[in-house]
């Protein structure tokens, strides 16, 4: 597509109204395909990590999202993320959203397709660079997180993120998940379901997409040449959003 823009999926969040030409570059990486069986829960039991086992940089977790397979009008990934992490559906722009659906419109063909957006889990995350308390940090395996115990809610990371992927918690939270601590006055974003990944499970959004039969979200180890995502990377063209920034994102897109 030579020219395109992104239209609002809902009116709840202006962050879904994105300008493709502002954030999408022509830089691409070869990616390549191996289908995941519908309903697959565990991406690899061997990837389960014991609680006393250190996180290693031998692994780099990431996602490949196939825009051609993503069903327009389907929000199963958003619903699954909210359910898994204890988020209420977003009804206003200030509500927390860890993953949101936007629409990509080709102005030449008028073709409209869906685009899930979340934290891109950069190798060089600007949110980490600007955090004055080191609450924003990147694990050795590439997952970018926020330590809620030392986050002071300054929101520097919110402003630094080129993907508008971080949310500030404005209100007291009453319904929280044990494995997903959240708190008023702190910043949060997609964690790649780290509590699931450490047990050898795939992310909630990838699982929901697979159950729906779309298989648009492929999660796995970018460093493992035998992983499904690495094999796909070697043979199908994909794009990093704002590749011009040199952040080397862990989330890649196919078909945009």
Image: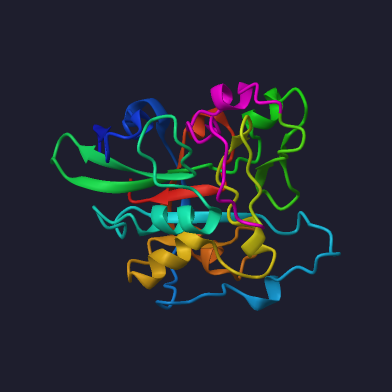
| Vertical placement of residue 87 versus 171, above or below | below
Residue located at (66% from left, 60% from top): 195
Q: Is residue 31 visible?
A: no
Q: Main secondary structure of the magenta part?
A: loop
Residue 183 position (above or below residue 43): above
Tell me if residue 31 is in the magenta stretch: no
Q: How many marks?
A: 0
Q: Nearer the viewer, residue 231 or 140?
A: 140
* The residue stretch that appears in magenta: 152-178
On-image quarter of the N terminus: top left
Which quadrant does the C terminus fall into? top left
158 drawn magenta = yes
Nearest the camera: 225 or 73? Answer: 73
Give residue 78's position: percent from left, percent from top: 40, 52
Name the colour scheme. rainbow
Rendered image quadrant of residue 35: bottom left
Query: Is residue 58 depicted above or below 50 in this figure?
Result: above
Expressed as whole percent of the image width and height from the top left, the position of residue 146 reads 68, 39
Q: Is residue 154 left or right of residue 76?
A: right
Give percent across and percent down for residue 217.
Answer: 43, 60
Position of 109 with respect to 222 (left or right) is: left
Position of 127 with respect to 8 (left or right) is right
Task: Estimate the x, y position of residue 231 in percent, counting from the top left.
Answer: 52, 66
Q: Residue at position x 55%, y 22% from top? A: 159
Q: Relative to the observer, which residue lies in front, 100 or 62?
A: 100
- Farthest-out residue, right: 52
């Amino acid at each position: 597509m030579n020219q395109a823009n992104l239209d609002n999926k809902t009116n709840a969040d202006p962050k879904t109204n994105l300008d493709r030409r502002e954030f999408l570059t022509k830089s691409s990486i070869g990616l390549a395909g191996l289908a995941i069986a519908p309903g697959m829960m565990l991406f690899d039991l061997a990837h389960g990590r014991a609680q006393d086992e250190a996180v290693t940089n031998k692994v780099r977790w990431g996602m490949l999202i196939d825009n051609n397979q993503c069903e327009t009008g389907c929000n199963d990934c958003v619903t699954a993320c909210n359910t898994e992490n204890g988020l209420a559906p977003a009804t206003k722009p200030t509500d927390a959203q860890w993953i949101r659906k936007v629409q990509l419109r080709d102005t030449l063909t008028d073709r409209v397709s869906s685009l899930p957006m979340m934290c891109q889990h950069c190798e060089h995350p600007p949110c980490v660079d600007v955090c004055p308390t080191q609450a924003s940090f990147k694990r050795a395996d590439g997952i970018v997180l926020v330590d809620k115990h030392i986050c002071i809610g300054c929101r520097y990371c919110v402003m630094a993120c080129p993907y508008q992927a971080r949310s500030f918690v404005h209100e007291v939270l009453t319904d929280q998940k044990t494995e997903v601590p959240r708190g008023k006055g702190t910043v949060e974003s997609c964690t790649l379901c780290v509590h699931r990944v450490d047990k050898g499970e795939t992310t909630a959004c990838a699982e929901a997409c697979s159950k729906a039969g779309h298989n648009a979200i492929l999660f796995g180890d970018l460093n493992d040449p035998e992983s499904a995502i690495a094999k796909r990377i070697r043979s199908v063209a994909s794009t990093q959003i704002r590749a011009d920034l040199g952040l080397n994102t862990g989330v890649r897109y196919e078909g945009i």
